[in-house]
Amino acid sequence: MKPRRATRSSAGSTVVAVFMAAGLTLILSGRAESASTTCHASTAPSGAYTVLVCLTQPSSGSTLVGDTTVTATVNVTVGTSPGVGKTEWSLDGQYLLTDFQSPHQFTLSSADFADGAHTIGVAAKMRDGYITPETAITVTFANGNVTPPENTRQWSVPPIRARGPQEPFVVAAVGDGAGGETNAVNVTNALVGWNPDLFLYLGDVYEDGTLTEFKNWYGGPTAFFGRLRDVTTPVVGNHEYTGNRADGYFNFWDNIPHYYSYDANGWHFIAIDSTSNYNKVAPGSPQYEWLVADLAANRSPCTMVFWHHPLFSVGSEDPAPRMQAMWDLMAAQHVTMLVTAHDHNYQRWTPMGAGGVPAADGIVELVVGGGGHSSQGFLSSDARVVKTNKSYGAMRMDLYGNRAELHYHAAGATGTTLVDSSTISCKGPDRLAPTAPGELTATVNPTPSVSLAWTPATDTYGVTGYRVYRDGTAVADLPATATAWTDTSVAGATRYEYTLDAVDAAGNRSVRSQPVAVTTLGPDTTPPSVPGGLVATASPDAVTLAWSPSSDNVGVTGYEVLRDGTVVATVPATTYADSAVPPDESHVWTVRAVDAAGNVSVAANPVTAVRDTLPPSAPPNLRVTGVAPGAVGLAWDASTDNIGVARYRVFRDGTLLAETSSGLAFLDDTVGNTRTSYAYHVTAVDAAGNASAPGNTVTVTTADASPPTVPTNLQAAAAGPNQVLLSWEPATDDFGVAGYTVYRNGTALGTTTGSSFTDSTALSETSYTYGVSAFDASGNSSGPSTPALVTTPAATPIAAVADTYVKASSPTSRYGSTPVVRVDGDPVTNAYLKFTVSGQAGTVLRARLRVWVAAGSSSGFVVRPVADSTWSETLTNWDNAPAIGDTSIAASGRTTSGTWVTLDITPLISGNGTFTVGLTSSGGSSSSYGSRESSTPPQLLLDMRS
């Protein structure tokens, strides 16, 4: 849940001056405060009570080094107190931290900021909605920081404790607890008491997830959730984001990725950023496509995904339908469970498949948001919900290789109470292989035979058998109970190498064991293997043979070379050059291996070759196939040869340029960049190295590859908000300039044949960098010109012709004459702005809405369409106001009083006509903006293309 901060108002406030001096005591409204205390009293708008807010430490003017305790008190001095809801703290006017209960105290790490003077401010929000003005002091930070320190550390998954196959791996999970309240203490005491192997924090550090809030409310090594930091893998929640940034989260967690995965004790864990701020959950987005690959590579049958926003919920927070595509993907990959938070309660849903349809092998969604920051009830019911509970508490999961045993415990000051328990079986396919069998030994027996023994392999679901390999070939499949086997099919005096692997019921095979080698007893009667890969290479001087080695049980001693069936040599190596063969005759060679016992292998497959001394014919019909800048294409017809042409040699101006394969074409891309003549000829070469005479010669003149000169003296001048005039000095080229390419901000804008260009697509109040290059008829382009910079003037603003706001709590009230328009989320308050556009020619390039912030807020406003523009600002109220569309056109984010906010609303403005835009709140905060009755009325800024 994300209740947003209301805008602070000074309505009804009474400033009490505070005078301080050493030893002086200040008496305010009957209370005594020390001279180091700074106080501010204010009266609620109703006049029912007066609040005194005192910043008690540190004292104003002090110098802070390292960590400092900051404390405030809030007391109602006159009237009846409605109760203090919270205190909100700022540093130099920027939000710092919210404290939700007394004592209002936190630790400020001054070393997280730059040195120098800083202002610490605090305001109280009372339970009736009144927010006091800030009480502020000035202090000096002195930590040696010229600028705020940058965190360059890189987060990694913490070390995972290994557990045995039958020993539970304990995982704790909860979210929405880091707000510094007593309930969070009770929950974290329970978590620490479980001593979990892993803790999943499911997001939301209150109120805005600043680094100061993380350090205080998530906690350090001895406080809150920080006591489990060494075993924590977190995900980000919506409270950590302001706009599209979550700086506190990424700083505290050392630049953790938005999404990541890891394996632990047979389970696969996947963390996802589910926020709409990050908004990368749809197919095609980087996070979604990463999830596709991660699930495809996952080998575990048990998978747990965790993110912040539930897809299914019966709580007071809206579900997150944007997560549906990821859910369906996970269902197809048999993910076991999804663990979420966001709703401040507990929900367990029945297993569901794609689309949320109940399925026995579906995903179980858990909502575990009772971490300690407020409790939320349930607004609806759903037949798919198995269990709900709104107690503060956390989930304990005892994980095994094929299941998860779940236990949700409510946590209080005196201990925990078991609320819900269940067992979830893993439905994913078993893709985890067994471990390798260990300690393989081999014993040689006289028969001959070889006896093997090993220690058993292990598997998540159990080993179903073993396979024995001899010299890499499977020779036996054995049952799961086997730890020994004897090989009786071996020969005597032979060397063998054995390995072993294990298999489970799903067919997953382990890696093989370490090999063990033995040599059997008895005489050697086994011949070597046949030599492999015999090849012959011919040259004019010899035929050279080469082959791959043979193998033998006791070792090969040499090779016999046979020509035409007769042994011509015995060699120890695997090559032989036969130079005694007659030239230009075809002969047949083969090879066989011999071992020390005189056993001879079968002869290798024969090869035929010729000791060739005859050159090929000259390559005919050399011709040019193309000429381009920097390149010449050649082709020729094939030569003939008694044993075949192996390659061709290309010569340019009599010098060897390249050797090609037997192909009949060549591209010379080494010619010069100007028009030059070259003479080419080609010769043929056979496999024996005999070269032919040259073929015919062709002469080629290369194409123009020289670019034009660079255009000079580029000038750019704005002729209006949407038009820039460009001119330059012409370029020159050997064969003539064909045209110019104009660039804006590095992107080609258009071409022209002249030396000027008009850009009619420029936007107002925008800086542009222009450049121009020249090109010739051959496609050669010059380099870019010296850039020219120009800034377009502002467009003439169009003032609103009507504006008002309407309030749900006052449905008949009308506010068309007020100097401001307001938006709020509670009570819902919407604003309407009407503009009339006339006399505009062309198409709309851009339309912007500019409003003056009279009173800002942390959430600002959202611009939405209004189809009906017939309303009157003097007659419009909540009951008769035109409908505001659901589409969000633009959002301001946090707005700051006394500034302009400008938003792009181009989709709403089509040209001439009357248009209405609606402003709604993006949270629970109130804010107001100058109306047309003020000195800072709303404006419409149009950029037009004529």
Image: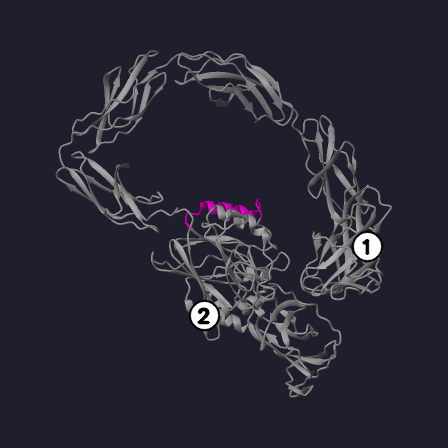
User: Is residue 511 visible to us here?
Assistant: yes
User: 227 above or below 381?
Assistant: below
The quarter of the image holding the N terminus is bottom right
Q: Position of residue 741 (x, y in %)?
A: 72, 35
Amino acid of disc 2: Thr
Please name the amino acid that badge 1 sits on: Lys
Q: Does the magenta segment cover residue 290? A: yes
Front residue of 705 and 562:
562
The answer to whether 195 is drawn above or below residue 676 in the figure is: below
Dot 1 lies on which element?
strand
Which residue in the protein does label 1 denote?
834
Segment colored magenta: 282-301
Q: Nearer the viewer, residue 754 or 793?
A: 793
For label 2, count other residues whose C-alpha is less than 10 Å away and answer few (under 14), some (14-19) or many (20+): few
Where does label 2 land, which residue?
Answer: 417
User: Is any part of residue 796 visible from this angle?
Assistant: no
Residue at mark 2 to residue at mark 1: CA–CA distance: 58 Å
Compared across the picture, whether 231 is left or right of 356 comes to: left
Crowding at mark 1 (Cα within 10 Å: few <14, some 14-19, many 20+): many
Above or below: residue 248 compared with residue 436: below
